[in-house]
Amino acid sequence: MKVYYIAIAEAWRLLTSGDALVMPVIGMSLTVSGSAVAMAALIGIPLGYMLGLSRFGGRAALMVLVNTSMGFPPVVVGLFVYLALTRWGPLGFLDMLFTPRAMVVAQVFLATPLVIGVTASAVASVARDLRLQLRALGASRLQEGLAIILEARRGVMASVIAGFGAIISEVGAVSIVGGGIEGKTEVMTTAIVANVGRGDFGIAMAWAFILIGIALMINVALTTVQNLGSAYDR
Amino acid sequence: MKVYYIAIAEAWRLLTSGDALVMPVIGMSLTVSGSAVAMAALIGIPLGYMLGLSRFGGRAALMVLVNTSMGFPPVVVGLFVYLALTRWGPLGFLDMLFTPRAMVVAQVFLATPLVIGVTASAVASVARDLRLQLRALGASRLQEGLAIILEARRGVMASVIAGFGAIISEVGAVSIVGGGIEGKTEVMTTAIVANVGRGDFGIAMAWAFILIGIALMINVALTTVQNLGSAYDR
Amino acid sequence: MTAEASDMLAPPTAPAVRGEGIKVVYRRRTAVDVPSIEVAAGKTYALLGASGAGKSTLLRVLGLLERPAEGRVFIDGVEASGKDLATRRTIAAVFQKPYLLRATVGANVGYGLKLRRVPKREREQRLSDALARVGLAGWEGRSALTLSGGEAQRVALARALVLRPRILLLDEPLSYMDPLLKRSLTLEFAEILKSERVTALYVTHDRDEAAVVADRIGIMRDGRLVSEGDPETVLTLPTDEWVASFLDAEAPAEGLVATSGEGVMTLACGDAMIIAVGDLPLGSRVLVGVPSEDVLLFEHGVQIPRTSARNQLDGVVSEVAPAGAAMRITVAVGDLRLASTVSRSSAADLRLAPGSLVTLLFKATAVRVRPRDTIAPIV
Amino acid sequence: MTAEASDMLAPPTAPAVRGEGIKVVYRRRTAVDVPSIEVAAGKTYALLGASGAGKSTLLRVLGLLERPAEGRVFIDGVEASGKDLATRRTIAAVFQKPYLLRATVGANVGYGLKLRRVPKREREQRLSDALARVGLAGWEGRSALTLSGGEAQRVALARALVLRPRILLLDEPLSYMDPLLKRSLTLEFAEILKSERVTALYVTHDRDEAAVVADRIGIMRDGRLVSEGDPETVLTLPTDEWVASFLDAEAPAEGLVATSGEGVMTLACGDAMIIAVGDLPLGSRVLVGVPSEDVLLFEHGVQIPRTSARNQLDGVVSEVAPAGAAMRITVAVGDLRLASTVSRSSAADLRLAPGSLVTLLFKATAVRVRPRDTIAPIV
């Protein structure tokens, strides 16, 4: 077990000293995944509402599409984004490959289906009886819609939190489109892989600490959101 | 979009010709993840039952632990397993690092919490009323337990399917402990990353096809299992 | 009182709610098929029926909350639809579940007023008035989470009343309650509906609840209205075997008007001749029933004192069954079946058992009559 | 019939189920606190009460399905616990939800026999017998998924009866049903319980259901038995205001035995003197009630024909309320309150309204009496 103690002690030293090698990578991770989840929320929440609320034709097909995208292997998403951004690809002119922006794009693709799916099911599960009660109280269409959004807010928050959790600990897509270039496109997950390869277990363990902390926080946040309860009782 | 067409055409050619470079990697992926999920089921299903059935003290704490493990970043799991298997690690004498067996070990750690968690909630959700009815029909303790297992089988199946889906498309842990050595420890996800780096998009796309197919099949299987319904009606 | 008197003198006005040719279809099954229904202004109309009979669906259609497959709804004589927010806002509803916000009682009751952008000062005044009317004066600041089931449903009623609706829909508002609470709330709701003079459509599957609240009752079965009229006639004179069984009343007998004059008729029901009040034409085919509470039983052959009861018939007990704390005795008089409710001790005193000979006594005024082949009774 | 006769001659045996000092505590709240309860062999005991009163919990404890915090349960005079599988297998239960397997009716009814490893041939024989007893002969091959609610619950009853239980627990078996279906199934279940001669513990919140099925009724409130006895006395003579309100019966009056002799007593209830049968000691404090079905109302001052009814009292109408299709008239005789059930037309004929003067007439045998401060009535 000695190998663990050594790595953990080294990690603690690096984190508490604010090491110049460790800290920027943490910042990059948070920036990339934070931007990605914000964009995923902007795109996914309205789409999720529409999908959850309305009963248009083809809605079932769209839900299957969203569910499948949620289960899509991240490396495959990485591959598709890479091909789009490569010099000969349709978006090659943007010259974004191997930049943090490319990682954001890949993570948006990963997080958006999650946000759409969870939001849609939260909205759809708002009881039909409740909508009837709202209408019977004289709510206009707009007022009814707003009340349902309010009622589904737990699910929406959960979708964004879950989306962030999924992308910050993901490694396949970001390593493909970011390339894991030291000091430029390294995030915590790619850096762990790279430093284990180099035998720098202390540094790898430092990032692992942060990732574990984030995983714990997300678990706590999801539990809290689930216990928030409905605005309506009984 | 031409870059996509070329890659897809090349992938199709490789798959239909049973290419000697592409096929063994698919076999390795299925073998590693299949063994891992089988072991995770052997360990996780009994533990999940115990957790879901009984009301012992500390049960709540254990559920939190399981839930947190489910959200654990795979690269972190990879790092811990690597340190255990490294020459100076507690299990270094097994000389397993950079072998398929090491990847199985890492994936068992990834899949087991999922199997435990989903099984436990499936067992716990078997209605208390139903257990009362079984007892009132004169079921012995053993008969009651077997009937509940039968009743929770949907959740158990779902847990195993979801576990397989999670580990076959994972790349972080397997690349750390397997090292992605060509012809030895390459699985589909690590091979996609490696071949994109080399510019071999056709080969990468071939594996992406298989992974997408597996993701679709898992989606269908989960939906089917959820619609199986309870053994008991009303 | 003066309002009541002037109301009685006023000429008949358009019904507050009228449905015409209402048809609702769910998955190819006709859920509601009601050619015509009217709810008089200021009155309470109870829709009574088993679950799945289409009562709630009809309520939603008449309350503009659901569009029917066919048919038209008129509110105060004017055709209306759910798209017309102003008309919809003259209608309020109370459902089975109160669906209260996790907020104060005041916020809940004021919610509909807020949707209507009623100024805060007026809102607070109306809110405290409404709470007083349901017996919860001063409860504004309480959390809705701490309420009991009965209190929550009274808050839901206040939330509807505060909107000063022309029309109030109540969809099984008391069906989740204990019998005890249900009975007291039924009386309370009936009193509030009466004093508010609101037009109410009240859906329930409980005969006794309907009897307490309603000025008029319609019985639904499989989407159709199968009986309609004032509570006493609807509840005591079922239109057919099914309605009789649903109401736990004796199935009505068929009869012919044998003599008729000076407001008194003789009805031939099989072998039995029954005297009733009314003046239907000679030879009319009628349905005849006598409420079991109005039928007295005597030992056969006993000297019966002189009485104003015009009907005295001999019969044979065919069934003795418990009905609440009392007993329900079914007696066959030839083909005619009449029931009498007696206490358990009376049943024991008279040694009533299937086969016993008994004499039945009831007044002509107790006999309910309606012409056959109409669902609406003569009132 | 012969079985019944011999049963009446047989000496009293140990009760089939007996509970002693039963206490159940949920989260520090006492859910059940019943010092003593007995269910006689072959009889049906109904536990009646509002939801949350502890009825179902007491049923589970007496049926060995739940261990109480304190107290002992005796089955046929022998102390028993849930660990004793053989004893547990002499008890069967029917719950609110039938919980049928997604399989044939036959597989469902045979399930308990399979658990007991009864050979297939015997299983099939008993299974078809049990189905016949609930009126579903020959339904073995049907899918349980296609059953209606009433059929499903009859299958659940057959599944319990097929085990030939010594003791049958029924926990609100009909509470999810429509009133119509509920009434017919109540009669059917009562008949089956009687013909099977099984010891039954029947939990319900419905007074009428209890009245139909029970040989004995216990009323529970907040975990305690507050009234117990034969159905007629329990239902017509509430032990206190709460029970009266729960049963929708008049609260009993308090009285003193003023004279007593030759099986007839005079009871002083405030100003009123009531004649009743019985021979309690002079000066005993008693609770007095008269079933509303037994009280006849007359216009005040009218010449009442000679009658065997010994009690004739003048009073003032204090309340007129609908009760089903009839009306319930509450009359104050001094401090004493009596109720009379009359039809709506009689109420109109007599022009009954609060304040009307009326004369009440009822027999001495109709008067229910029990000593104060005991929950069990004198039978």
Image (tube, coloured by chain):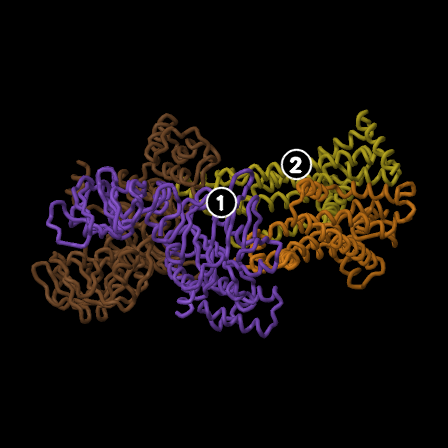
Chain colours: A yellow, B orange, C brown, D purple
Residue toward you, C25 or D377:
D377
The residue to which callout 1 is attached is D35
Q: Is residue A106 visible?
A: no
In the rendered image of this protein, does residue A54 appear above or below residue B30? Answer: above
Check if mark 2 and mark 1 are on a common chain.
no
The disc numbered 1 marks a residue on which chain? D
Q: Residues within 10 Å of mark 1 (few under 14, many from 20)?
A: few
* Residue D372 pos. (x, y %): 35, 42
Quarter-wise, where is residue C218 in the image?
Answer: bottom left
Q: Residue at x 30, y 61 (%)?
A: C244
Disc 2 residue type (three-letter):
Val
Residue C358 visible in image: yes
Q: Quadrant of residue D246?
A: top left
Q: Residues within 10 Å of mark 2 (few under 14, many from 20)?
A: some
Compared to residue C32, the image places residue D138 above or below, namely: below
**Which residue position is annotated with label 2?**
A220
Side of A10 where D45 appears, left or right: left
In the image, D63: left or right of D360? right
Residue C72 vs residue B18, the one in the foreground = C72
Which residue is found at the position 32% from the left and 49% from the top?
D236
The Cα atoms of the two marked residues, 2 and 1, are separated by: 47 Å
Depth order, front residue of B104/A168: B104
The image shows residue D347, relative to residue D131, as above or below, that is: above
Coordinates of residue C144 in the picture (x, y in percent): 45, 34
Q: Chain of mark 2?
A: A
